[in-house]
Amino acid sequence: KAGVTQTPRYLIKTRGQQVTLSCSPISGHRSVSWYQQTPGQGLQFLFEYFSETQRNKGNFPGRFSGRQFSNSRSEMNVSTLELGDSALYLCASMGGDHFSYNSPLHFGNGTRLTVT
Amino acid sequence: AQSVAQPEDQVNVAEGNPLTVKCTYSVSGNPYLFWYVQYPNRGLQFLLKYITGDNLVKGSYGFEAEFNKSQTSFHLKKPSALVSDSALYFCAVRDTFSGYSTLTFGKGTMLLVSP
């Protein structure tokens, strides 16, 4: 079974631009979560989607948004990029139904975003 | 609110020696606990989880973890460390008190195994 795929792997953007990151979950997984990883803050939860609906949202400004499509693929968008948005953005999918609290997350290899 | 603490930024151990990576948690209800490992320029890889039952949980690559409810801890252990175990380790918790919640991660502990 193919794992979680994130594209692109690396991105370099300029401050003020916007960016869209893509995530394809493991086949059959309906939950997709996004995390931001930085050396100083560690892993910070952005949002989670389940069957095209946002189920949870972290404490990030409105410049960060996401969506999920009917095939469970997900995208996240960051508008008006700031230098502090430079990070590794990780996508994770999870199997099971809406109440699968005990299922682990399966992570992709991330997109490394550098804002200059 | 749920939280996880990994008190050590780095753990150093010699190859062949036992290793322990510490994790404590705080939840309102019952915890679901997870350990992940991250190698450079890669995503997180699931190692093991505790949901209920035996306090000693066995996972991938010879790792195990011990759940201690009274000490609210979930330490990761391995009887004999390998150089290839050198990586960043994350503990994570999900609180079951108020229904579904997201997974909260600790800051991570860098494990360095010397030959």
Image (spheres, rainbow, N blue to C red):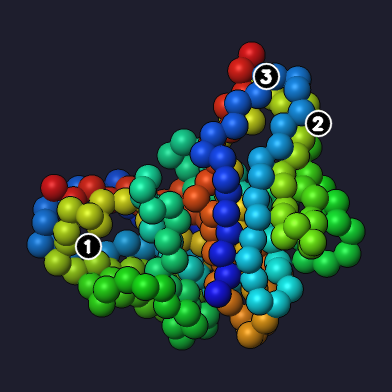
Of the 4 image quadrants, the one containing the N terminus of chain B is: bottom right
Q: Secondary structure at mark 1?
A: strand
User: Can you tell which of label 1 and label 3 is closer to the viewer?
Assistant: 3
Residue B27, relative to residue B41: is it above or below? below
Residue B40, relative to residue A92: is it above or below? above
Q: Quick check: marks 1 and 2 in contact, CB under 8 Å?
A: no
Give the residue type that dot 2 points to.
Pro
Give the residue type that dot 3 points to.
Ala
Instruction: Report whether residue A77 is seen.
Output: yes
Tell me the residue that label 2 is attached to: B79
Q: Chain of mark 3?
A: B
Q: Could you give the CA–CA distance between mark 2 and mark 3, rounded to whole angstroms?
A: 12 Å
Residue at horizontal 83%, vertical 67%?
A: B52
Mark 1 residue crowding within 10 angstroms, few (<14) / some (14–19) / many (20+): some
Coordinates of residue A12 in the picture (x, y in percent): 20, 48
Q: Which mark is residue B14?
A: 3
Q: Could you give the CA–CA distance between mark 1 and mark 2, rounded to whole angstroms?
A: 45 Å
Q: Could you give the CA–CA distance between mark 1 and mark 3, rounded to whole angstroms?
A: 44 Å
Q: Chain of mark 2?
A: B
Coordinates of residue A89 in the picture (x, y in percent): 37, 56
Out of B115 and A12, give the one closest to the viewer: B115
Q: Secondary structure at mark 3?
A: strand
Residue at horizontal 25%, vertical 77%?
A: A62
Considering every residue shown, the one lying at the far top of the view is: B115
Residue at horizontal 58%, vertical 48%?
A: B6
Instruction: Report whether residue A71 is seen.
Output: no
**Lower sequence index among marks 2 and 3:** 3
